[in-house]
Image (cartoon, rainbow, N blue to C red):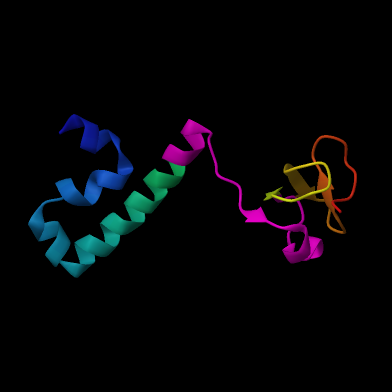
Amino acid sequence: MSRQVNNPTMWDKVRPVEWKTDQNIASYMRGIELWARQVYDNITGIKQQVSYTVALLPAASDYEAHTIYVSNETGGATLAFSDGTNWRRVQDRVVVS
């Protein structure tokens, strides 16, 4: 049971039935659980980056200060960040191509 309590993805399974059926309580608990999941993700520090190919990169201007994974960049897969104008490789700041 303790493994489920410590794992935010399992909280719905340990929630009392009356908390699931009362819509006010259910809505309140969803808000708390969303916040707790975000805290849990921040504490673990491991995030999966969204993956793109070079041909399908979104506009860098729409994602300033975001990071992504580019699966087929010249020289191999890499992390990239948006400087507001271009997607740049993290390792050397060269524009992704």
Does the image show residue 19? yes
> Is residue 49 shown in magenta?
yes
Asked if residue 65 lies left or right of residue 23, the reply is right
Asked if residue 40 lies left or right of residue 92, the reply is left
Name the residue at 71% across, 51% down: 66
Where are the magenta residues, as a range? 40-67
Name the residue at 9% across, 57% down: 17
Name the residue at 74% across, 51% down: 72
Question: Which one is in front, 64 or 79?
Answer: 79
Residue at the extreme right = 94
**Residue 10 image position (x, y, % from top left):** 25, 45
Asked if residue 73 lies left or right of residue 3, the reply is right
Q: Quadrant of the N terminus?
A: top left
> Is residue 18 shown in magenta?
no
Does residue 76 lie above or below 27 as drawn? above
Question: Which one is in front, 32 or 71?
Answer: 71
Question: Which one is in front, 10 or 95?
Answer: 95
Asked if residue 42 lies left or right of residue 55, the reply is left
Circle count: 0
Does residue 13 lie above or below 91 as drawn? below
Q: Quadrant of the C terminus?
A: bottom right
Residue at the extreme left = 17
Does the image show residue 58? no
Name the residue at 87% across, 36% down: 92
**Residue 47 image position (x, y, % from top left):** 55, 41
**Residue 41 image position (x, y, % from top left):** 47, 40
